[in-house]
Structure formats: C-alpha cells, structure tokens
Image (cartoon, rainbow, N blue to C red):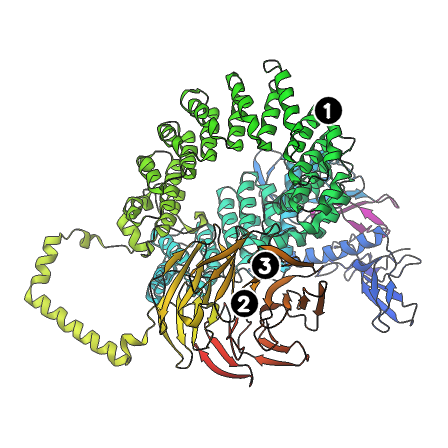
Amino acid sequence: MSTPQKKCTNCNAPVFPAMVTCRECGTRTQSASPQIQIKPVANTEVNSDGKLRANCPHCDKRIKAPIQAAGKKVRCPKCSRSVQLPEVTAEQRELYESSQLLENFTESKSSQSSDDETSFEINLPLESNTGVPQTRKLEEVSDSNSAQPKTEPSSQSSISRKSSTSGKLAATAAIHAECNACGAEVSAPLQFIGLTIPCEQCGAAVKFPDRLNDSNDSAANQSHDTSPDVRGRREVQLLRAIDMAIEEEGKPPKLEPLPFEDLLPASVVRRHMATITKALKENSAEPSEPAREALTALATHRAADANEELFPLLKQSSGAFRLELLSCLAELRHPELLPSLLKALGASRGPDVKIVVEATLRYGDPRAILPLLYAADVHRQLVRTIYDGIVGMGAAAGNQLCRLVPKIDDSTTLTVIADLLGRFEGGCPIKTFRLLLKNDDVMVRRETARSLAKLADGAAIPQLVRSMRDSDDEVRALLAQAFPRCANEEAISGLMKYVDDPSPKVRCSVIRALGESGLIIPLPLIRPHLKDEDLDCRIASAEAIGRLGDPNGLTFLLDMLREADVESDPALPRKIAASLGRMKDARATLPLLNLLVTDDVQLKVQIARSLGDLGQKAAREPLERLLSHEPSEPVRIAAARSLGELGDPEARSALALTLRDTSSVQVVAIQALAKLKGRKRDIVDAVRELLQSPNAAVRREVLTAYGRAEDPELISEVIPLLADKDAEVRTVALQTVRQLGDTRPNSELLKLAGSPQVGTASPNNKKTGVSLKLPSLSVPNWIKSVSPAALVGLFANPVVLGGLSVCLVIGLTAFFWTNPLGIKSQPVLPRGNVGQVSVSEDGKWLAAARSRGLLEIWDVQQQKVVSQNSELRPKFICFGPQGKNLLCAAGKRMALIPLTNGQLGEPVDVKGHDGAVADLQVTPDHKFAVTLGSDRTIVRWDLEKGAPAGAIQPDDSIDYVAISSDGHEVAGASKVGKVYLWDMDSQEEIARSNIKGAKIQALAIQADGPLIAIGGGDGAVMLWNPDSNGEVQVDQSSPVPVRALTFPEGGRLCIARGTTVELRDVESGTQSVLETSLETISTLAVDKQGKVVTVGNEEQSQVLVFESDSQKLIHELDKS
C-alpha cells in the first residue's frame, strides 16, 4: 500500500510525507517537520495518531490507549473490567517512534536558530580531507538495533558529510540505507541511527544501522571502549538523557541553613552583587578577582537572597564567568538551574567538564543522575568523582536509580546502577534487584548479586532463593553471601538446598555463609564436605563447623596446616590462616605463631591479621617483634593493626616507637593507639609531634585522636591547622575544634589561625563539607601603609575625638528613634524551626528543640520563652517527673538538664549509647523514658534517678520504640513491619508480630490498656493486641502517611497525619479532628491525661497548643 501523496506548492510534483524538499525543484515541502504516517496493517487496531483501539468484550465500549500499552491489560472506563489490548508489530512501533523523533528534531532545529539557550549540540573532533582538525555538530542518535547499512566506499561507516566553502563542516551529516522494496537509497539525519522511516519513493519501511561501524558490534557494548564510534554513541546517549531530565518534573533538595553567625548581612550581599554586576559589564567571559571572591562568599555563606539576582546574569555571561555563576547558583540551589547545568554538561570540554560535573553533583537534583552516568562514560577521568558524588546525594539518588532501571536497556549502564545501589545504606530495594537479576547480561546480574550481598534483609529471602537457580556460578556464589545478613532460620533453610551445588565455587560460598549464620541446623549437611574433592570447599567446611561449635573443624584445619608444604605451596597456608582467624578459636594461636618463621611476606601478613582476630594477649610480644624487626612494610602495618585489635595497654610503648616509621605505618599505629585501654590524653601526648608531619593523612589521623580526647585545653593546638595547605586537613581540623567544645564563628577561628597556605578556592572546586576559607573584604593600600602609632596619634587629637563623639550620639539617636523597642526587640539567638516538642505532665511547660540547635522552655499560659540553651543542639527531648529535669539527646551525646521554675541549669552528661540516638519516648507520668541508638541498643531511663535502668540489644534492626505507662515493657518496630514487645526487667521477649506489607513510621503503647498502635507510611493505622495471639486490626481509611502517634490515658488514640490530628476512641470508634494551619505535622506531644495536644512542623517555627475536649486552639506560640 502506498503512502498518501501531496503536491509540491511550486511545481505540482508528487511529494511523499517523508520528503523534506521536493526532488524536482528543491522547494521545501513544509516549514515545520514533515509528517510521517504509520502504515495501516491488516488485523490491527493502530491508527495514524499512534493510538490503539479495542472493544470491551463485556460492554462493547470503544477503548483508546497509547501505543505503549500494546499487549497489556487496561480497565474499561464504562464497566471497570479488564480488557486485553492487541499486540502491534515492531515495524508499526518503530514507524510511530521515528515520526515522533523527526517532529521533535525539526522543532529543536527551529528553536536552535533563535537566541534561546536550548541547544544541546556537542563538539567532536573530526579530521577533514586535508588533515586539519575540524568540528562537527552531533545531535540526537537512536540506540536500537537495525538492519545492515549501505556503506560508502570512502568511509567505514555509512555517514556522509558535506564541507562548506569556508572549510567548516556544515551540519548535514547523514546516514544511508537501501530500501528492500524498490532499491532506492534513503537518507536521513544522523540522529536516525537505529530507527525506521518510510521510503520516499514507495513508502516501505527502511531501517537504518544502529552504529556507525557494524564490524565493531561486540566492542561497542563495552563500557571502557574509547573508539570514536562508541564515544560518539555515548555522547548521543548523554544528550538524550539531558533532554529527558529537563522534561522531567522535580526540584532540588532544600538548602540547609547555616548557623546564624555565618550568615551574610543584607548590606554585604548587595555589595557582592554590585561587584559581580560591574565585572560582568566589563568582561562577560572572564570574571575579575573581586568578582570571584564575591561569588565564593555568596556560595560559602549560602546567601539564598542573591539567587534571583544571580540567575538572570547567566544569559549575559560566557566562558569562565558562566561557569563561576553556575557553580555559585548550584551551591545556592536555585530551583530553575537544572536545565542550564545539564546543557553545560553536554557542551563542555577539557577542564571545564570537571567544574560542571562538580557543580551538578553539589546541586543534588536526582533528575541529573542519568546524564551524569552517561557523562562518566564520555569523560572516563571523572568516573570516580561522579559515582562518589551520586552516592553522596543520599536516599533521593538511590530512589532515582531504582526508577531508572525499568527504563534502561543498556547493560553497561545497568551494571553501574547495580554497583551504585550497593553503596547506599538504609534499605534494600528488592523490587529493583529483582528486575536486575532477570537481566540477560551476566555482568549486570553479578554486580546486582554483589550489591544484594551488602544490603539484603528479611524481605529479600524469597528473591535470594529464586535467584540461586541462576546459570552463572559467580552470581550464585555472590548471592550466597547475602543469606547470613538475613539472620533467621528461613534464610538458612533456603540456603541449605544449595550446599551440594555442582560448582565448587558456589559450594564454598554456601558453606562459608552457613558457618557465618551461627545456626547449628546445617551442621549435618556441612560435615560430609570435609572430604569434598575441592580443596577450598574442604577448608570452608572445616571453618564453618568450627564456627558453629564443633571442635573437629579446628582439628581438621590444623592437620592440613601441618601437612602443608609452605615453601612449594604458600597459598594453602594463607587460606588456612585466614580461616583460623575467622573461627576465633583461641587454640589456633600457638600454631599460627609457629608459622611466623616463614619467609613468605603475604603469609606473614595473613598470620598477623588472624592473630588480631583471635584477640589473645599471648600474641602481643610476637606482634611487637614484627613491628620492630620486620623489614616488610605490609607486615608492620598488619602487626600494628592487630595490636590495636588486641587492646592490650602494654602494647602502647611499642606502638609509640612505630610513630617514627613510614607515614603508612604511622597512620595505622595512631588508629591502633586509639583502641587501647587507658587515658585518651596519653594518646594525644604520644602523637603530638606528628601534627607537623609532612604527610596530610598523618595530620588528619592525629586530629581525629585529638577529637577523641574531648579536652578543651587542646583547642589552641588544633587552631593553627585551620590554615593547613591541605583542604581535607582544614575540614577535619574544624570538626575537631567543634568536638573539643569551641563554638566561636568560623570567621573568628580563621583569623586566629591565619590565612590558608593555598589560594581561595572557587565554589566550583569546593569539596563537600564545611568550607574553611571565608573571604575577607579588600583593604585599600593607603590604609595598609598607615602605621599603628600614626593611627593612635590621629584619634588622640581632640578635634577628631570630638567629631567622632558627635557622630556617635547622632547615630544612636536616629537608631532608637526609628526602632522604639531598641535592642530588646531583637531575638537573643537564631531560633529556627521546630524539630521536636515535649509537654510536662501537668501541661504547664513546653520544651521545643529547634532546627538551629536552640533549646527553648515555654510557659504555656503566658506564651513566652522563659529559658534557652544553645550548647547541646538536641534532636530529642523529654521532661522528667514534675518538670524537674529534661533528658536531651544530640547525636551520641546525652545529657540531663535540671529545671527550676522553667529555668535551665547546667547540663550533666550521661552515658547511654555508643552510637547516635535514633528515637526517644517517655511514659505519661514522665518517670521513665526509652531511647533507641544506632548501635542497635534500647536503653530504659529512670528519670527520677537520672540514670539508665536496663538495656537490651535486639537481634533484628529496630527503627522505632515505645514504652508502657509503668515503664516495665518496651515495644520496638522496624520499617518493614516487624513489631516486638519486651519485658525490660527480665530482658526477655514477650511477643512479636510480622505485619506483611506494613511501612511503619510511628509506634505507641496504650497508657491504660494492652494495645500497641502502629502508624504506616501508606496511611494505615494498626492496633496489635499481644495478648490475643498476635491479632492485628488494620484501618486503611486514609492514604495520608501517619507521622506521629500518642496513646494517653482514656483510650483515645492521637494520630498526626498531614495537617490534622485525629482523636480516635478505640472502643467506640468515634473520632474528632483537630485542624491546624501547619503545612504538615512532624512532631506531636500530649500531657498525662491527653487534654493538651501540642503539634509542630520541622519546616515552620510556630508551636500550636490545642484543648482536646473542645478541639479549640488555645495557644499559638512563636507565630511568625
């Protein structure tokens, strides 16, 4: 069937839709893009508009759907039943996609001719016939498979290029193919590589090749291939990803506020903006030094007020000035900057690329991740920077990578994504891993298995068991390493099925994983493999049964060690030594010490490591001899590390002598000294001289040791390193000063330290972390030339002194005239938004922990702040009994602050957790509290005594805790639906429940009943009664996520979700709602009887206080 024809407007010749110009007279057929129609094919339901049509078999309703829904089921809009849409041929789909691409291509060409900055062209080096490097502009190219091209004799690819008379290459690169129907040669722009369009003569479908050189097909799929063809293909993928990212809706993460003392005054911001504007008018391509300093200052101090003034300057700038502006705006997170950043990413070359990449990473918008992945392929020197930066974006980047997986077919990119997913913490994206493990490319599956082994949890067990049937040995071996992370009988039972895998590599991995599980169930299956035909399997079996408590495992390994010939086969003793160390059986210490006479360096290194793993003090002296007499540096490093693992204080003198060794040994020795028992100040005294070490890594490690000492007297020794020549040392020095308790502003500390020994870094090369270089205002030379004595004489003159006094009086009068409240009207400290609130049991006092670290005590009735503290910067707070003290948690630090009539006293540090506090809850009478630490410990606190009153360490990961009204029982829950109840007196588990599919975000125990309330991120509210065989009632009446729960006396459950607080009677089912003016509620607190309900939002400053019975707002504290 021929394609419908049109007539040329000039010569009336027939014109086909795919023709851009008439073949007879050359007249352009259309001003916009030529329209390509999809050929109708018999027995299909595809129209030329790209829509599918089908009749509902139930109600005969005509259904229309996009072509992407072909072969899928959709719901009938009339009868709501499922309807199967017909499949379409690949030819029909490609015809439709190519027509859409051609339309978009013509529109982009027309837009590029305007002054609007929407061009994504990139410059590639191209050799002309004369050998002179020229430039060609490469636009978008497809990536799908194709038929064989018709190649030209003069080139290895089927691309033709036309040069203009000026010697520059015109943008007319084209690709050619032959029509199988009529034999005509069909040409198209270069971006039609891999696509299908109709023949201009007969209308038949013609496929173009998918690469510039078909002979190199296998190499083109390799990520490290740097051939021009593959490089061009990667650059085209980069441009396509940029287009997709710009079209995608989203916004960058919010800018975190700086401490008040580091913010720039409005007058300084205006002065910097004037400097930048002036420099731009003088030279729009190269910024002056004052302009660079001004941009650095705005970025360093996060002057978000300058955003709207800086952004329009992008269109006026070019070259280095534009890059400086992009870097500054990226630091300030301008919401509309992403298109400009991505266009610069696609067009930059040479050293400019690194600047743009680092700015894009600092901007932190997850939409830029796919372009960054392709940019890593194009610019191989930036691979590590890009990958580390993506991981540094946090959870938003991980979620974006998961969303990209179903949309990408390129195995190289999927392999990279699988690797990156394994570097994130906080969850296992099992659905994404499931898709990746189904991929046909073995490298994708291997990298996915490696990442899954790092992140697997209980929810991954079914997928792990299924994927152990993979055809690749490496994939199965890597997946086996994931089972011990699940740490339950279900996982180990699933893994036991594969202990007899035909592959020795898989058997060895499975056996070692069963040994790591700690469960004795698989012992009968492991013992037969002590006679396995594979040597590694025999070693792994002996190690596994030894770790599971069978002494025969150690005996077997020691027999193998005695029979091994160290000289002829040193690899076997190394494997046995590693296994002995992992077994942690003290009886292996002496045989390992006997092996130290060997001359094999690698074996000595492994023995030293294993002795450290065993932890026996008998190994101290041999390790000290290695440290002082061994000529090999790797052995000395391993010995120093193992001495630290032993923790024996008597090793301090030997490690102190090692501080004169090479810098690599010094770093490990400092780390080992920090692990020894004893005074931390003794370690500082031993390493003090190394503060002047020429090696930056050594200086950083010494600073870390200073920070652990927690002695404020050491601050003066650390401050000079704020001006160190190494940027990372300066960052660690500032962190150490803060750890030692110095709260002075950065600018004041830098004045004390002196100027850094390197030049001011512009924002485009500023590393992540706290910036140490704060720009100073330029001082005129005539002021520098005036001596101090001359200045003293000048101001001692009576005339000058009198004039200054008059000016001071006039200035103060004008200030107080225009500001009647004077200084008293200004807040004493920067306040910030509400992080958490706590209400005393009588409802009289309210404590608020704010985002900038300020702790406030409010008198609720008088609606005023009566006391403040800015030292602790707590994240979690709760009142003690009768409001006499306040328990605060700030990271690892916990403190009790005495309260007298609302006045805060001096904090008293208390020891509770080795890790940061992740959750805190209190009983209604405020006598007991419970805290959850990142070290997986749960601690109960007696707030009357101000001390811990019991602790447990659950086997599973816990994310939320709650405490009963009498303080005897504690509940814990994980985000994946596991809920536990413990008796804190006996430290035994009372009950547990596994709520499948739950996405837990909040937890509370009923104050006067047996119920435990659970709030979900999907809006579900669940009630679990541990006394009734684990029965769970689920209410999913609202999809709005639950942010907080409280369950006070009276049986009324308080549920904070969205902008409301629901007060629900769990017995009668009646419910009332408190409407708030907050954007969303993030913190909720009630008094003992549940009559006063207090809410706050972490992004707003006010605290709302309601009376629950009348549902009335009685106080609005800090309204702004």
Q: Nearer the viewer, residue 957 or 419?
A: 957
Residue 851 colored magenta?
Answer: no
User: Which residue, given by chain and number where applicable, does mark 1 sit on?
Assistant: 534
| Magenta-highlighted residues | 180-209
Residue 188 colored magenta?
Answer: yes
Query: Which numbered mark, 3 or 1, is in the foreground of this view?
Result: 3
Q: CA distance from mark 3 to mark 2?
A: 11 Å
The residue type indicated by label 3 comes to Asp
Residue 1080: give its label.
none
Residue shown at the point (48%, 47%) measured from the top left: 355
Marks 3 and 2 in Cβ contact (< 8 Å): no
* The image quarter in which residue 795 lies: bottom left
Q: Is residue 138 visible?
A: no
Q: Is residue 397 visible?
A: yes
User: Which residue, given by chain and number where applicable, does mark 2 sit on?
Assistant: 966
User: Which residue, given by chain and number where applicable, does mark 3 sit on?
Assistant: 983
- Residue at disc 1, secondary structure: loop
Looking at the image, is 790 positioned above or below residue 1031? above
Looking at the image, is 705 positioned above or below residue 582? below
Q: Position of residue 224 (x, y in %)?
A: 63, 35
